[in-house]
Image (spheres, rainbow, N blue to C red):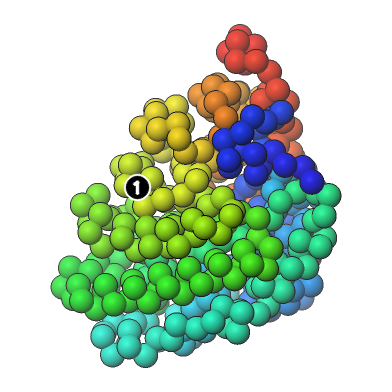
Amino acid sequence: MQEEFLKACRREEVEFTPVWLMRQAGRFLPEYMSIRSNHSFLEMCKTPDLATQVTLQPVDRFGMDAAILFADILLPLEGMGIDLEFAKDEGPVIHNPVRSQKDVDALKIMDAEEATPYVMEAVRQLRHELVGKVPLIGFSGAPFTLASYIIEGGGSKTYLNCKRMMYAAPTVWHALMQKISEVILRYLKAQIKAGAQAVQVFDSWVGCLAPDDYKEYVLPYSKYVMDGLKDQGVPVIHFANNGSTLLEMVKQAGGDVIGLDWRCELDSAWQRLGYDVAVQGNLDPFALFAPPAVIEGKVKRILAQAAKRPGHIFNLGHGIHKETPLEHVQVLVDAVHKYSRLSLSQLLED
Ligand code: CP3
């Protein structure tokens, strides 16, 4: 197996910098859209053959250095008793949002194999398909991000209901976060048991919080998940989107690799974190709409900032946009592979 991704997660020396892209298994790929035209998104997630096929698409097309399981962060919520739908052009909708202690009490903490057998089956199939290729990343949402969907009933611009519960009904908030954290931990352990070789925890919306609120209302729960994964033998990537102001606390919560969005400079962010963790990132996903020469320049700049320290995984600062030109993705992957083989002085000269 091509090991550069796992080596970088462990901060070992690599021949070249590994690259994969968040949301790489998705709608910017014509081969994804062709399957999607015959199936709903949830159907695809719940059919291991289809999830397997779609997971492999970006690896086969572009030569990504890791595969990420095709699934969604909201899938484990169904087993808790949440009524989830992916409405056309609207994204996820939850028909029974949680707003009270009674609602929290009704949520189930279920066995992950029982609640999401199709996810574990897809992981097992993928490991089989990926023999001799690249490692498989499993994933979950982080406690805050899942709580935000559960409380709001979908995406939100203000997180009003979520923050109202946090501030005005902290007992309910803490009870909910405790339940979600347990579900996440069990879900990730089950993926690892099924064969996931690394896992990423996505805290996609946590950047809406003030640092002191992150510390009080979120950090203990993200830490509970991270602590519970420490003895599982696989690297854990912790990504807090829009979290430049939270980095030190994100590290404190835990993770072998800290994800960086594009709103920070990789070099100063890594310095703040300390070099005893690996980092992943951090190109603006919309930089892929620039011409190839500009993309290459930006790749070199990020690689120069990583400065050949062990422990850098190249990625976008968030998920790839569905209108991204395919050729530009190939430009990016090839540039990372080519320029990361240069010495630092060559990289700076070039
Ligand atoms: O990274 C990958 O390629 C693996 C697959 C993956 C998906 N969702 C597939 C997906 C992963 C890792 C996710 C995680 C996810 N899901 C996150 C965290 C990552 C992030 O971007 O911050 C979040 C917040 C979700 C929730 C979610 N799922 C939303 C908001 C949406 C709608 C997005 C939109 O732009 O419409 C989804 C749907 C979804 N998840 C799609 C895919 C490929 C599109 C479904 C379709 O085909 O219509």
Q: How many marks?
A: 1
Q: Residue at x 80, y 56 (%)?
A: 130
Q: Position of residue 176 (x, y in %)?
A: 32, 76
Task: Locate residue 141 relative to residue 30 in the image: left or right.
Answer: left
Give the quarter of the figure containing the C terminus.
top right
Residue 204 lies, in percent from the top left, at 44, 57
Q: Circle 1 sits in a helix, a strand or a loop, which is it? A: helix
Judge whether 38 appears above or below 55 on screen. Answer: below
Instruction: Please give the name of the residue rendered at 28% of the width and 90% of the height, measured from the top-left corner.
Output: 102
Where 183 falls versus 288 (above or below)? below
Pointer 1: what residue? 252
Direction left: furthest residue: 168
Task: Place residue 313 in its image quadrant.
Answer: top right
Image position of 255 (left or right of 331):
left
- Residue 227, image x and y in percent? 42, 58
Q: Residue 127, how many percent across, how many down?
A: 76, 61
The type of residue carrying mark 1 is Gln
User: In the image, is 283 to the left or to the right of 244?
Assistant: right
Please name the residue shown 66% across and 25% down the image.
Answer: 340
Which of the pair 167/227 is nearer the observer?
227
Q: Is residue 92 visible?
A: no
Whether label 1 lies within 8 Å of ligand 1 gets the answer: no
In this rendering, does residue 308 appear at all?
yes
